[in-house]
Amino acid sequence: MFDFLSNNKIRFILFQVVAVLIVAYVAYYAISNLNYNIERLGIRSGFDFLGIRAGFEINERLIAYTVDSSNLDAFYVGLINTIVVSVIGIIFATILGLIIGVARLSSNYLISKLAEVYVEIFRNLPILLQILFWYNLLLIVLPSPRNSFDFFDKVFLNLRGVYLPKPIFESDFSWVLIAFFLGAFLSFLIKRFFSKKHDETGIKQRTWHYYLLSLLGLPLGVYWLLGSPLHFDYPSLQGFNFDGGLSFSPEFLALVLALSIYTATYISEAIRAGIESVDNGQKEAGLAMGLTQTQTLKFVLLPQALRVAIPPIINQYLNLTKNSSLAAAIGYSDLVGVFSGTVLNQVGQAIEIILMTMAVYLTLSLLISLGLNFVNHKMRIKGLNE
């Protein structure tokens, strides 16, 4: 009767079906038990709270928001702040990590040891302590608004943050953006054309001026023809503080600084491991062909090293994004602080709010992984491991 169980394929499928049924039953039981307890305790549920008036101010915001805005608007403010911190942190961590990673392999003893000391110090300190350290240091070191550090009379830095010119876009600026994307598409076609020509003839041509013309010349030409549909609102000192412009708080600066410095240590080690994985003969061949040390690093070593380094770098980008949730320790208005903190304390619907917050971090992490895995796939050596 049970002879079919002797078939490995049928038994394999049967075990998987049983496993799925067990998981589904456990999930059903957990959700049913949760709903029963919510009704029994009279806890309010649902997402109606998103439309309720928030009733609190958020100082750091990039979209329109007042105390009369809804809890959903507060969610958007926190989400945008989290994304901004993560993106800027990833950019700085990547640049710093690349420099430190290459410096670790420098033939100059002092540069190599300084890079090693940097990595060993900041990698072995808890990220929360580093955030608190940089925040308190900025508050002590930076001057008052009246004595701000002044950069070309356009950018100001003081203990209340950094003040930048704020771009004001007119409606015609959309044509400049269209011209930019059209230029990017033209660059893609130019790259394909010259790559194909290189494969057919073996002759490599200089193409940088074509890219410059399509990516910068075309948008700048449209910008000039439309009469400069972009101007800037510059910050100016009014009384005891600056007015106008675009400002970022000391909390934001401390958070970006700490996340970048901490994550750069791991990225630098991934870069170093990637470069060391490249056979030394590749470097010798590059030098033998007449390339300089810099050209050998740029055209021979790094392209191969990045194939090894990208997977661990993806993990560090994900860690940086998740570590941004520690912003609440210094009062920065990120998603956790605004939505899972203030809004949760007001409406008390923990399950819905925590689930929404978790869904945001999960989505951001998956998008980062998807993007970098695509880059990793495009950089693979054709014909290898296929």
Image (cartoon, rainbow, N blue to C red):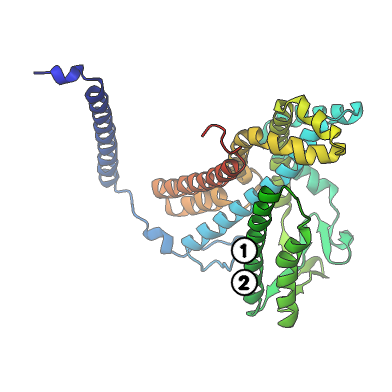
* Residue receiving disc 2: 178
Q: Is residue 118 left or right of residue 186?
A: right
Work out whether 54 lies above or below 384: below
Mark 2 → mark 1, Cα distance in angstroms: 11 Å
Relative to 100, say whether 330 is above or below.
Answer: below
Residue 104 vertical placement versus 71 (above, below): above
Q: Is residue 385 left or right of residue 212?
A: left
Sort mark 1 into few (<14), some (14-19) or many (20+) by Cα contacts within 10 Å: some
Q: Based on the displayed image, in which of its 4 quarters is residue 211 positioned? A: bottom right
For label 1, the SS is helix
- Mark 2 vs mark 1: which is more N-terminal? 2
Q: Nearer the viewer, residue 25 or 158?
A: 25
Q: Mark 2 against mark 1, which lies toward the viewer? A: 1
**Residue 163 in the image: x percent, y percent?**
77, 62
Crowding near the residue tagged with mark 2, few <14, some 14–19, many ≥20 C-alpha atoms within 10 Å: few
Q: Position of residue 187 (x, y in %)?
A: 67, 61
The residue shown at (86%, 26%) is: 113
Residue 230 visible here: no
Q: Work out which residue is located at the far left of the displayed protein and give it.
A: 1
Amino acid type of the residue that numbered disc 1 sits on in the rendered structure: Phe
- Pick the front one: 206 or 143: 206
Q: Is residue 141 something one can see in this rendering?
A: yes
Q: Position of residue 130 (x, y in %)?
A: 72, 37
Read off the residue under disc 1: 185
